[in-house]
Image: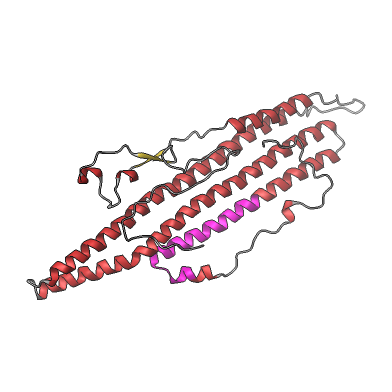
Amino acid sequence: MMNRSLSVRSKKSHDSPAEKSAPKHRFTMASLRGIQQPELSKKLFKIIKSENHAIGAYESASRERISIASQISDWGEATGDDSISDISDKIGVLLSEIGEQEDLFAQNLEDYRSVLKQIRNTESSVQPSRDNKAKITDEIQKLKYKEPQSTKLVQLEQELVRAEAQNLVAEAQTRQKLKEAYDLHSAAVIERGEKQILLARHMRRLVQLLDDTPVVPGDVRPAFEHSAQARQVLNDAEEDLREWQPSFDPIPSSATEMGSNLMPPSATGGSTAEPSVVGGEDAPAQLESPQEKREISGSTAVQSEGYQPQQQQQ
């Protein structure tokens, strides 16, 4: 709403956002990648794809809401009633801002979706290690049954330890990224809800300025005397949006307590660190006001040497 015009009338333009068709979902190579992935990452692939469709729906809803805002303003002007014209135009401004908040919500969901992709990549990369762990475990059990004194048992047990370490790394990353993803998601839902409630309350103030007292035949309805108050409502709404701050508590995270070898400080002789906060000062997942550019990056990943998730594109 910052630097927004106090009117949303279309200036007689025939182009409207509603006339722009929403992007269609077509069969792509990404669909084939989803079929070829391991079971866990395949499930995440479906979630990520479904979220992409949902985000597109929010973007479409934003365009429709902005279009409706312009239409209600144009209709009010066409009535020839000064009070309806003024109030409907300012209602259109607030409706348009509600549409902008819907688009901002879609952008925040895209940040959350990008973290889901990191989880999918981790799950996909660690699957060979999980399969190898199961294979080694099976070989150890067979060897203990057939040749309990075999020297090969030591080698297999060492391989099993390495495989378990890789699995623990992936598990830690998945837990950390899952918290980060739904911290972003829930924060976006709260921001959208609180800002839209804020705008709706100011809209109710505008509606109250419209006099709906019946006029008997022969009488003339008094001239609209609340133009200054209606304009002040928009100024108040703009000020409230500018001063909005998140009202939710940050989500704590203990991920930074783990070292690169996935061992807590208590096990390595180090000092115990204070838990960081997902979405707080120690992590970049915090949502900013709509006037500030957000730079959402993943919080510190817990990775061991020699293990890096493969990057995939969606």
Name which residue lies at 74% across and 24% down: 229
Residue 132: where, in percent of width, then height? 27, 69
Q: Residue furthest bottom?
A: 146
Between 162 and 220, the one lying in front of the other is 162
* Quadrant position of residue 250: top left
The magenta region covers: 33-61
Q: Residue furthest right?
A: 218
Q: Please check the rendered image and state whether residue 156 is part of the magenta-colored stretch, yes or no.
A: no
Q: Please check the rendered image and state whether residue 47 is part of the magenta-colored stretch, yes or no.
A: yes
Q: Is residue 229 above or below residue 21?
A: above
* Quadrant position of residue 198: top right
Name which residue lies at 66% across and 32% down: 238
Q: Is residue 231 above or below residue 146?
A: above
**Does residue 270 appear to the left or right of 70 in the view shown?**
left
* Quadrant position of residue 25: bottom right
Between 224 and 67, the one lying in front of the other is 67
**Does residue 291 appear to the left or right of 66 in the view shown?**
left
Between 272 and 43, the one lying in front of the other is 272
Residue 49: where, in percent of width, then height? 52, 61
**Does residue 108 appear to the left or right of 135 in the view shown?**
right
Between 314 and 9, the one lying in front of the other is 314
Q: Is residue 199 above or below residue 108?
A: above
Q: Main secondary structure of the magenta part?
A: helix
Name which residue lies at 90% across and 28% down: 217
